[in-house]
Image (tube, grey):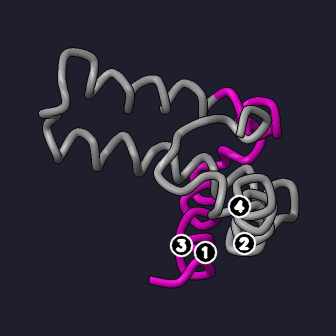
Amino acid sequence: MSQEFVLQLLRELVSEREWGQFHSSANLAKSISIESGELLECFQWGDDADPNRVQSELADVLTYAYLLADRLGLEPDSIVATKLEETRGKYPINKALGRSTKYDKL
């Protein structure tokens, strides 16, 4: 499924219900955080979370992330690719290979 197809589905859902009025950038960012907390709750007591619940909560996080990117006029694929390039620079293979150390401590 393409990014544009998913965005179109989201736009239709929001439009049909007139929810756009509630989708300020701040509200969408808050919703990402709230849904991320619900995703984390799936793993609160161990790593053996219910896969269906994890899928549902992850979908909520992604939904709000797509909606926020759309609201800001950003293309998710593009901003992720840009961020990956920045990360490559911060974490060169010769210093970061097999390590979880933050870039400023490498």
Q: Amino acid at mark 1?
A: Gln
Q: Specify the segment rendered in magenta.
A: 1-30
- Compute the Cα span from label 4 to label 1: 37 Å
User: Closer to the observer: label 1 or label 2?
Assistant: 2
Q: Nearer the viewer, residue 26 or 51?
A: 51
Q: Amino acid at mark 4?
A: Pro
Question: Tags 3 and 1 in contact by the CB under 8 Å rule?
Answer: yes
User: Closer to the observer: label 3 or label 1?
Assistant: 3
Main secondary structure along the magenta-highlighted residues: helix
Q: How packed is label 2: few (under 14 Cα within 10 Å), some, or many (20 or more)?
A: few
Q: Nearer the viewer, residue 46 or 26?
A: 46
Q: Amino acid at mark 2?
A: Ala
Residue at which label 1 appears: 8
User: Which sits earlier in the primary sequence, circle 1 or circle 2?
Assistant: 1
Question: Is residue 20 within the magenta segment?
Answer: yes
Asked if residue 26 lies left or right of residue 39, the reply is right
Q: Secondary structure at mark 3?
A: helix
Q: Nearer the viewer, residue 20 or 83?
A: 83
Q: Position of residue 62 (x, y in %)?
A: 52, 52
Residue at which label 2 appears: 81
Question: Tags 2 and 4 in contact by the CB under 8 Å rule?
Answer: no
Residue at which label 4 appears: 92
Q: Give the quarter of the image for residue 16.
A: bottom right
User: Which sits earlier in the primary sequence, circle 2 or circle 3?
Assistant: 3
Q: Is residue 89 above or below residue 57?
A: below
Question: Is residue 69 within the magenta segment?
Answer: no
Residue at which label 3 appears: 6
